[in-house]
Image (cartoon, rainbow, N blue to C red):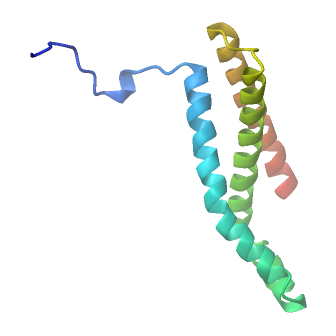
């Protein structure tokens, strides 16, 4: 059987709703935090090795690249936390409708942007 269906492979023409974007970002920030564990574990282990190790980590963390990485980790953590709270509330039976789900997703994204700016101000 040959089915004639339209095929749309141009992803730029697809408009995702806010809830889909929030779900994708939640997964991406989870992966970012998993990868960030390598950096954080190294920094924690070296800083606890003694005063020299602490001074090494302190010197590394004063560079722009390290601050940018730390800002990215904090941003991912903040968004993942907010989206996780959103999912927990949805598991309780709230915000499951289309309109309220999109509104809560938009709120989580906006709050994450605010937290990201605050993390940047705190780091720099």
For residue 62, which quarter of the picture?
bottom right
Q: Residue at x 75, y 27 (%)?
A: 86
Residue 94 can be seen, yes or no: yes
- Residue 50 location in percent, x, y? 88, 89
Residue 124 can be seen, yes or no: no
Quadrant containing the C terminus is: bottom right
- Give the number of marks: 0
Does residue 43 lie above or below 105 as drawn?
below
Q: Residue at x 60, y 21 (%)?
A: 18
For residue 92, which quarter of the picture?
top right
Q: Residue at x 40, y 21 (%)?
A: 14
User: Is 6 on the left or on the right of 55, as rendered?
Assistant: left
Q: Residue at x 90, y 89 (%)?
A: 51
For residue 111, which quarter of the picture?
top right
User: Is 20 on the left or on the right of 63, as rendered?
Assistant: left
Q: Nearer the viewer, residue 97 or 20?
A: 97
Does residue 77 lie above or below 5 as drawn?
below
Quadrant containing the N terminus is: top left
Judged from this view, the residue extending furthest toward the left is: 1
Q: Nearer the viewer, residue 49 or 113?
A: 49
- Residue 23 location in percent, x, y? 59, 31
């Amino acid at each position: 059987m040959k089915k004639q269906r339209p095929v749309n492979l141009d992803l730029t023409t697809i408009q995702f709703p806010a809830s889909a974007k929030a779900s994708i970002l939640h997964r991406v920030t989870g992966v970012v935090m998993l990868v960030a564990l390598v950096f954080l574990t190294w920094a924690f282990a070296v800083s606890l090795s003694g005063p020299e190790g602490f001074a090494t980590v302190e010197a590394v963390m004063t560079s722009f690249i390290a601050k940018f990485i730390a800002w990215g980790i904090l941003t991912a953590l903040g968004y993942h936390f907010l989206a996780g709270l959103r999912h927990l509330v949805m598991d309780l039976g709230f915000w499951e409708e289309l309109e309220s789900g999109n509104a809560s997703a938009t709120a989580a994204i906006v709050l994450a942007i605010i937290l990201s700016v605050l993390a940047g101000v705190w780091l720099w």
